[in-house]
Amino acid sequence: MSAATFVQVDVEPGPASEDGVSLRFKRAGDDRAVREIPYESEEGVDGRWTVLAAEDAGASETREARAVLVDDSSDGVAWLVFGGRHGLVLEHVGTGARVREPYLVLSKTTAM
């Protein structure tokens, strides 16, 4: 399979992932920009979150996050939300709470 068949997620060690992450997912569709997602943080804050790709540890340099359907062993197909060299920065729309994630895998039924 060609490299375009896969989505490579490489996240440097930092706030989104202490040890860093390097994973490859089999693409099942085209990627697109994503600005807001439903999410529940580890702290239990649930609702709509803005999502950006973080290019540096402090998330002072950001760009749009991307979402793509990928093969998933449990659901068949799922959304992969991925970002920059330092993963994702999410901000809760209602409270302003911020969290960092290296990437997210969400159900294909998730409204984005």
Image (cartoon, grey):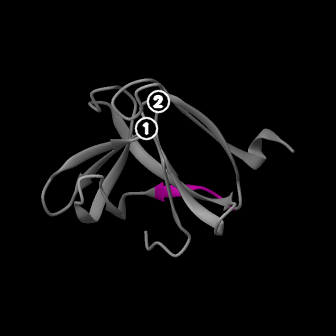
Residue at coordinates 34% horizontally, 62% vertically from top-left? 39
Which residue position holds label 2? Answer: 85
| Residue at the image point whose x is 46% and y is 35% from the top | 84
Residue positioned 70% across, 54% down in the render: 27
Q: Amino acid at mark 1?
A: Gly
Is residue 89 left or right of 84 when viewed as pictured?
A: left
Q: Report the magenta residues as a range.
A: 29-33
The structure residue drawn at horizontal position 52% and vertical position 76%, both measured from the top left corner, is 109
Looking at the rendered structure, the secondary structure element under dot 1 is: loop
Q: Say which quarter of the image contains residue 38.
A: bottom left
Magenta span dominant secondary structure: loop
Answer with left or right where residue 84 lies relative to residue 62. right
Q: Single out the residue that lies furthest toward the right.
A: 1
x and y percentages locating residue 90 in the rendered image: 30, 49
**Dividing the image into 4 quarters, which one contains the C terminus?**
bottom left
Q: Secondary structure at mark 2?
A: loop
Mark on residue 87?
Answer: 1
* Outermost residue, left side: 95
Q: Amino acid at mark 2?
A: Arg
Q: CA distance from mark 2 to mark 1?
A: 6 Å
